[in-house]
Amino acid sequence: MIALGVLFFLGFLATRAEPALNVLGGIVEELSKGSFSKFMLVYAVCAGVSMGMAVGVTKILFGAPLIWFILIKYAVALALSQYSTEDFICIAWDSAGVTTGPVTVPFVLATGVGCSKAVLAPEGFGILTCASVWPICSVLSMDLVRRFVVKPKAKAPAADPA
């Protein structure tokens, strides 16, 4: 459990250092006129990659079949896509591509190889798949929270100054 927590933290930091993620965050903030900030996108993607890495390592440690992880992740991503707007669906699915940059991929692959060798697993395949799909879910979730939780509070009627 401690190893998964450390892995989550390191995955978060490695993704945070990804240059393309900062560029995408700035573009999203500009195009959304500040309603979806760079901070929100960057940290949603970082959390998604971290969660994906933790799930991927869990798959390696317990030898679970990869197909179930893939099917469940994509089912969740597609279900969340049904409740989001087209703009943020595109942003979320594009954010998965940001995770294939020069900082994240070597770190994720090295982690997968190291974990599989440590537990004598036959292969470390699948950790990058997990780390690339969860950002889609986290960005879509962040959009839903932003739209359904944060905005209604901002639109609360003001008290009538009588």
Image: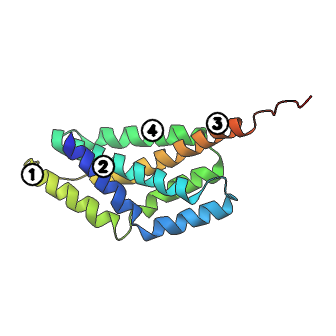
Pick whichever, 156 or 96, lies toward us. 156
Please state which of the two labelled residues, at mark 4 or mark 2, is closer to the viewer. Answer: 2
Query: What element does badge 1 sit on?
Result: helix
Residue under pointer 4: 75
Up the image or down, 55 lies above or below 90; here it is above
Which is nearer the N-term, disc 3 or disc 1?
1
What amino acid type is highlighted by mark number 3? Phe
Q: Label 2 vs label 3: CA separation?
A: 28 Å
**Residue at 10% over, 54% down:** 117
In this rendering, the count of numbered labels is 4
Query: What element does badge 2 sit on?
Result: helix
For label 2, the crowd category at 10 Å Cα-Cα, with few meaning under 14, some 14 to 19 and many 20 or more, is many
The colour scheme of the drawn protein is: rainbow
Pick whichever, 99 or 152, lies toward us. 152
For label 1, the crowd category at 10 Å Cα-Cα, with few meaning under 14, some 14 to 19 and many 20 or more, is few
Dot 2 and dot 3 residues touching (CB under 8 Å): no
Identity of the residue furthest to the left in this view: 120
For label 3, the crowd category at 10 Å Cα-Cα, with few meaning under 14, some 14 to 19 and many 20 or more, is few
Dot 2 and dot 1 residues touching (CB under 8 Å): no
Task: Give the left or right position of residue 139, taking residue 124 as reference.
Answer: right
Q: Is residue 84 visible?
A: yes
What amino acid type is highlighted by mark number 2? Phe
Please state which of the two labelled residues, at mark 3 or mark 1, is closer to the viewer. Answer: 3
The numbered dot on residue 148 is 3
Q: Label 2 vs label 1: CA separation?
A: 18 Å
The numbered dot on residue 118 is 1
